[in-house]
Image (cartoon, helix red, strand yellow):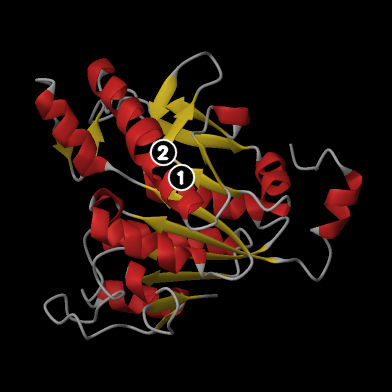
Amino acid sequence: MNTLSNKNSYSTITGENKPKLTIVKVGGKIVEEPASLKQLLADFAKIEGNKVLVHGGGRSATAMATRLGIESKMVNGRRITDIEMLKVATMVYGGLVNKQIVAGLQAIGVNALGLTGADLNLMRSEKRPVKDIDYGFVGDVKEVNASIIAELIIKSVVPVLAPLTHDKSGNLLNTNADTIAGEAAKALAEYFDVTLMYCFEKKGVLMNENDDESVISVLNPTLFEKYVSEGIIQGGMIPKLENSLEALHAGVKQVVITRSDQIHTDSGTRISL
């Protein structure tokens, strides 16, 4: 699935001068509160050129599960997804949160299309094998139908991707939104000059986790290894940066970690090879 069905379309997005594409991943907290969602969508709409939005929605899923009497179980920040929680995740991620974002974008003139990995066979996953922990119906991405996404983008459609994939056997799988963004970026790098932006509550990767102003402005593989060995970068930031470096090695031009309200500034941490 590495070629576009329309040869004319294909010719416009390959070669040395690939068009730019910005993929923005935002956490659930940003998209779940009306004020921050409104600001995010306004900022996102101002991004020039092609763009994709990837969202989470974990807090909304937890709240809905509680209302339905379903216990939420987390291990190392990852959700255990049994069949009942999968139903909740599908309702919340693929329904409520995704469609609120799409409706908000349409209201400000952005022609958006909300999608899960099952739609148009965008992302196929395999159920995560049981090792130390049984995560349940959680998917690890194995295939991205980048040509279909690219066709939508060049037709001025803005994909809004929910953190759900499928196994091509009729089963939906809960999939981490960071992973969705990273895998989409890697696959689309064949067609576009991709910048991947991870937005969260901090201004970037910090030298001192207790000082929100101590942003590391530039990172590369050598500096990453140095800061990890010195204990400056630790915890959940390590896998996020490992995923970022993997994306760069796969052809993504730049990865930025910043706050959602800073996407139009030079603030944040810029990662490159």
- Does residue 91 show up? yes
- Identify which amino acid the numbered label 1 is placed on: Val
226 vs 74, nearest the viewer: 74
Q: Position of residue 248 (x, y in %)?
A: 56, 65
- Name the residue rendered at 84%, 50% in the picture: 9
Q: Are marks 1 and 2 in contact (CB under 8 Å)?
A: yes
- At mark 2, the secondary structure is helix
Q: Position of residue 227 (x, y in %)?
A: 30, 77
Residue 189 against residue 255 in the figure, above or below? above
Q: Is residue 93 left or right of residue 85?
A: right
Q: Position of residue 160 (x, y in %)?
A: 49, 46
Q: Disc 2 designates what residue? A: 99
The local crowd at label 2, few if under 14, some if 14 to 19, many if 20 or more residues have their Cα within 10 Å, is some
- Name the residue rendered at 25%, 54% in the picture: 34
- Does residue 199 show up? no
191 vs 44, nearest the viewer: 44
Q: Disc 1 designates what residue? A: 102
- Name the residue rendered at 39%, 36% in the picture: 175
